[in-house]
Amino acid sequence: MFEHLIDFDPEVLPNRPRPVEAVRKADPTSLLDAKINTTNWLTKMGAVDSTELATALDTKAAQETFANLVSASPEEITHTALAQVKTPAAVQHLVGMLTAYDWEFVNQAKELRGYTVAKLVEETQNPNANIRLKALGLLGKVTEVGLFTDKIEIQKESLTDTELEQRIKEKLNRFMGVVDIQEAVLANDS
């Protein structure tokens, strides 16, 4: 069963001092990151493919942890659930669920945006003038419409150093009443 460990000779890395943190004190994100890093390290070292080792308990542990992470459960409960995610297969399953959740969240946000815009379009036909005006104003602020957005145009002019210096002096003169002083030589009356 452990024949693969006989020839297992991983590269020994130089000691890198890292702060050690108690599992109970670590936040759930750090704990999950540590499990992911361990899974990646085991894969890199040639450990047995974790999909072969997946069991119903691993899947259940990953699912429970996922539910706790996305539902903002108390930290103690999330720690307990994360402690049950022990095998690389369970960690990979959990990462897969979290990734799919992120994509689902993005898709839901797009759907909500479309729904909101559609409802605003409906409200532009409301018999109440106040509601129609508010709906039209909100539609005008939608990014694709951009009716009430400020547009700033930037034009770049190439100026020489002397032209730039002259413009700066003109602005200073206008705003501060600065006058160029010219040195004058006074003749002694003696």
Image (cartoon, rainbow, N blue to C red):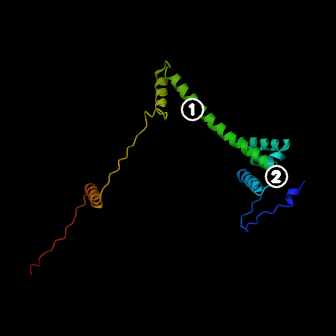
Q: Tell which residue pokes out farthest to the front in this image.
A: 7
Mark positioned earlier in the residue sequence (1 or 2): 2
Where does the image place residue 82, in percent across and percent down from the top left? Answer: 78, 49
Q: Quadrant of the C terminus?
A: bottom left
Where does the image place residue 67, in percent across and percent down from the top left? Answer: 75, 40
User: Does residue 119 sit above or below 76 in this rendering?
Assistant: above
Q: Quadrant of residue 94?
A: top right
Q: Which amino acid lies under the numbered mark 1 shown in the image of this protein?
A: Arg
Q: Tell which residue pokes out farthest to the left in this image.
A: 190
Q: Which amino acid lies under the numbered mark 2 shown in the image of this protein?
A: Val
Q: Residue at x 78, y 62 (%)?
A: 10
> What residue did someone put label 2 on?
48
- On the question of residue 80 being in view, the answer is no
Within 10 Å of disc 1 (Cα), the crowding (few <14, some 14-19, many 20+) is few
> What residue did someone put label 1 on?
113
Q: Tell which residue pokes out farthest to the right in this image.
A: 1
Label annotation for residue 134: none
Q: Is 55 positioned to the left or the right of 117 in the image? A: right
- Asked whether 179 or 64 is in front, the reply is 64
User: Does residue 100 sit above or below 188 in this rendering?
Assistant: above
Q: Is 141 positioned to the left or the right of 25 in the image? A: left
